[in-house]
């Protein structure tokens, strides 16, 4: 089944409802969106010469065109490659080259960066700016029939950094995306036609994945005119498009709750706030519940099992009289309906309640593997189980508590930052003998990046030099916020750097 069937169904059942809105203004209805997507798919096949299975990338700040592009890709039988708009040109280049993308859609703010990255992506033939006439011309012509796709065909190629620092493309199939959609209805919510979803978080990640359950139920998808998260703008859009669902990182929830404009939210404006991407402090969560009401729902997932490992429903959030209410608020909830979740030891043996081990998951949302990386696939997928690399424990009631995210991973503002990727860049400097990167608690962002650096004998090195090196090679949000120069890194008897001791120094 082609995931684009969701739009076909909505164009029939909710034909006169608003499908897309730009700010406070309606953009397209479901019937109009279906026709536009069908015509765009004709251009993808005929003008661009793309064949079923070809990859099409997009680097877009949040905009209505992102939904048009995605469904045109699937309608034509192609595979979408979403890219975080905050990445560095070199990171874009790797994804474009590794995926073999033949076409890339961009917003004007990213056109120059993608053009630079394209020089290292030999398969990429064309770049289309969604603000230009060539994109507008893609809506002109005759519609084409939707391509037939098998359930196991690749639909969404999500690049997630690994602990080695090299991004890996988690291959999500049409089945994965469909089951994820149905799981939303089973565990989180069943939105009502005529409601809305405001896309304040990046469309390339969680917010974009929530487009499926919204679109399938006739919910208007609203894109801020600013293309980013701005609390006053978001509140105004919730009031303009009520019964609103929204996906936010914990730091974004905190900013919403602490902003004075949150008091302007009208009754009925907010339906559900799904938060994920990082744990949320219980104190912040309590304040959010007091301010927003029982509208919060937590999810824990990975790019390899999108949005679907565990959840803490809004009903669980609301059980203040439960004797373990605070402990449950600090947890990631219970297993989703579509997956089985275990905590295991290094041999894969299930651990008793309360014991800490690696979290593994199995179900129809788990990826088919990593794109062109059989070695990484074999390490992560064993006997059908996804080994998440995350550490946690299950209590006697089945609630999962995360103890660490991939041991060394840093989560800042809901974005995963892998130390090895930054360390690889810092080691490029000839004056760096050794370095190690860890996370430091931050009251707003959750964590911030700190680099410990050992310089070579006689070398003189400044933080500014290292900062410039990072800005030239990785995304700005990944660079260290502090550089600590030390004489030696703490190590164990086997020469492994003891990051726990470095964190203790902070």
Image: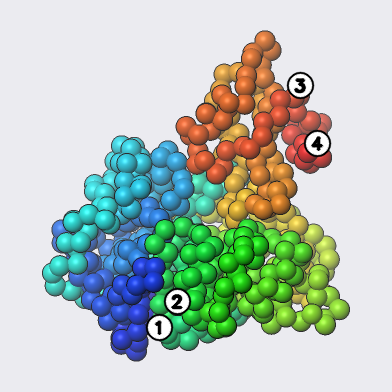
Element under label 3? Answer: loop
Q: Earlier in the sequence, mark 4 or mark 3?
A: 3
Decide: marks 3, 2 in contact (CB < 8 A)? no
Residue 123 image position (x, y, % from top left): 28, 45
**How far apart are the two marked residues, 2 and 4, measured between alpha carbons?**
49 Å
Q: Earlier in the sequence, mark 3 or mark 2?
A: 2
* Quadrant that contains the C terminus: top right
Q: Residue at x 50, y 38 (%)?
A: 474
Image color mode: rainbow
| Left/right of residue 25 with respect to residue 350 in the rendered view | left
Element under label 2? Answer: helix
Q: Residue at x 57, y 83 (%)?
A: 267
* Quadrant that contains the N terminus: bottom left
| Left/right of residue 116 with respect to residue 246 in the rendered view | left
Residue at image mark 4: 505
**How far apart are the two marked residues, 1 and 3, measured between alpha carbons?**
60 Å
Element under label 4? Answer: helix
* Front disc: 4 or 3: 4
Q: Earlier in the sequence, mark 1 or mark 3?
A: 1
Residue at image mark 2: 240
Residue at image mark 1: 218
Residue 172 image position (x, y, % from top left): 46, 64
């Amino acid at each position: 089944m082609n995931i684009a069937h969701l739009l076909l169904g909505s164009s029939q059942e909710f034909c006169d409802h608003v499908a897309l809105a730009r700010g406070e203004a309606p953009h397209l209805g479901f019937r109009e969106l279906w026709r536009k997507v069908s015509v765009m798919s004709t251009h993808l096949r005929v003008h661009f010469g793309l064949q079923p299975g070809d990859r099409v990338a997009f680097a877009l700040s949040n905009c209505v065109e992102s939904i048009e592009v995605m469904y045109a890709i699937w309608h034509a039988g192609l595979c979408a490659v979403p890219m975080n708009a905050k990445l560095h040109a070199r990171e874009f280049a790797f994804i474009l080259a590794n995926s073999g993308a033949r076409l890339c859609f961009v917003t004007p703010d990213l056109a120059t960066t993608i053009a630079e990255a394209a020089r290292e992506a030999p398969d990429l033939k064309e770049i289309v700016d969604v603000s230009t006439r060539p994109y507008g011309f893609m809506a002109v012509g005759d519609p084409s029939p939707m391509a037939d796709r098998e359930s196991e065909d690749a639909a969404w190629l999500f690049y997630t950094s690994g602990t080695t620092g090299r991004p890996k493309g988690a291959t999500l199939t049409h089945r994965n995306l469909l089951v994820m959609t149905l799981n939303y209805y089973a565990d989180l919510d069943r939105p009502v036609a005529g409601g809305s979803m405001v896309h304040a978080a990046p469309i390339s990640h969680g917010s974009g994945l929530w487009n499926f359950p919204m679109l399938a139920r006739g919910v208007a998808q609203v894109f801020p005119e600013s293309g980013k998260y701005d609390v006053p703008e978001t509140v105004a859009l919730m009031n303009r498009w009520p019964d609103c669902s929204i996906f936010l990182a914990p730091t974004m929830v905190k900013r919403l709750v602490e902003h004075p404009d949150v008091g302007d939210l009208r009754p009925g404006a907010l339906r559900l706030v799904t938060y994920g991407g990082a744990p949320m402090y219980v104190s912040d969560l309590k304040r959010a519940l007091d301010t927003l009401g029982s509208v919060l729902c937590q999810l824990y997932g990975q790019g390899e099992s999108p949005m679907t490992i565990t959840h803490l429903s809004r009903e669980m959030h609301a059980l203040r009289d439960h004797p373990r209410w605070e402990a449950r608020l600090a947890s990631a909830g219970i297993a989703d309906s579509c997956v089985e979740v275990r905590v295991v030891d290094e041999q894969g043996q299930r651990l008793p309640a309360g014991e800490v081990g690696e979290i593994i998951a199995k179900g129809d949302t788990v990826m088919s593997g990593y794109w062109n990386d059989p070695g990484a696939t074999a390490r992560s997928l064993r006997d059908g189980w996804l080994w998440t690399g995350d550490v946690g424990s299950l209590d006697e009631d089945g609630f999962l508590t995360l103890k660490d995210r991939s041991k060394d991973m840093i989560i800042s503002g809901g974005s995963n930052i892998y130390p090895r990727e930054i360390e690889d860049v810092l080691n490029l400097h000839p004056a760096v003998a050794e370095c190690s990167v860890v996370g430091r608690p931050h009251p707003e962002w959750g964590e911030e990046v700190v680099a410990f650096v050992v310089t070579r004998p006689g070398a003189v090195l400044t933080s500014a030099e290292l900062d410039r090196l990072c800005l030239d090679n990785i995304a700005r949000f990944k660079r260290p916020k502090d550089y600590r120069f030390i004489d030696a890194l703490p190590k164990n008897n086997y020469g492994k750097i003891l990051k726990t001791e470095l964190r203790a120094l902070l």
